[in-house]
Amino acid sequence: MQIQIKLQTTFILILFFGIFINVNAQTKEEIKTIRKANIFYNQAEESRKAAEKYEQEGLNLSMRRAQDECGKADENYKKAEVEYRKAIETTKGYDKGNYNLGNALYRQGNFEEAAKAFQYVANQESTNKDLRAKAYHNLGNTLLQQKKYKESMEAYKNSLKLQPSDMDTKYNYEYAKKMLRKQEEEQQQDQQNKDEQNNQKNQQQQQNSDQKQQDKDGKNEPKKQKGESKEEQKKQEQERQQNQDKRQLDALQQNERKTKEKVDQKEMMQGKNIPQEKDW
């Protein structure tokens, strides 16, 4: 709320600059147009202040009244804009007309167009220093509203070069500086968040890739086991064959031994039947 008060004060102080016009340089019709525009602008400011007062009360009835006053203010700001533009068309490059036009546009929230009007006045070296300083100040305000904090600080510095003791401009400069630091911190935090999200995304993609590779390896694993099983079966078959051959060989050898034993026994039996010579 404090920054809004300082902005309002600036506009109130310079509202009637458009009235003090050199009659020799301006036509009567143009003077009439400027005064009419200033009346609309003043009425709009009164409605805006009334709306703020009702909003602070916070009551339901007060809020409805605040809406009504805001509507009146918007309507009168638009009327003031129209009259200021008429004055500018009559006298091209009219600095006070452009300045007051900038105020009317600012109050309507048209910050880009307001900045153009204030910039025009600020650039006119032939314009008095006090008005140029206020134009730079309000240019800084329009840039501040657009969150262009670096640009707003530059505008405030230009205003302070012309009016070094203006406390409102000093305050707004420090406020813009603070907001710039906050903006940079937020941008840095956003970048860190993006980096973390990218890292998490890359890690997730790597995990997905690893999982796919594991799944692929898992599908190939049974084939490998199947191949190893055949080799193992072949080896086991060879071992069984060898064991079988060995058993057969052992059986043959055992049969041979039994056959030999039988032959030996038969020969022994035959030998007992041979008559022996007696020595008696």
Image (cartoon, rainbow, N blue to C red):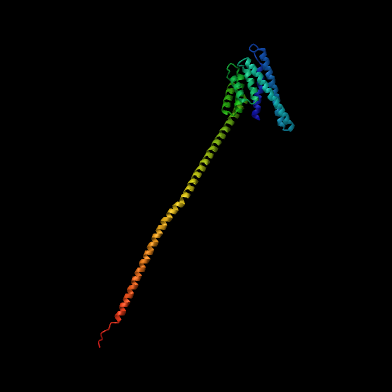
Residue in the image at 61% along x and 23% along y: 113
- Nearest the eye: 210 or 98: 210
- Nearest the eye: 126 or 263: 263
In the picture as drawn, the residue positioned furthest to the bottom comes out as 280
- Residue 234 vertical position relative to residue 273 in the rendered view, above or below: above
* Res. 270 image quadrant: bottom left
- Residue 165: in sight, yes or no? no
Measured as percent of width and height from the top left, residue 264 is found at 31, 76
| Number of numbered discs overlaid on the protein picture | 0
Decide if residue 200 is on the left or right side of residue 229.
right
Q: Quadrant where the N terminus lies?
A: top right
Decide if residue 102 is on the left or right side of residue 253.
right
* Res. 256 image quadrant: bottom left
Measured as percent of width and height from the top left, residue 133 is found at 60, 21
* Res. 59 image quadrant: top right
Measured as percent of width and height from the top left, residue 25 is found at 63, 12
- Residue 208 vertical position relative to residue 66 in the rendered view, above or below: below
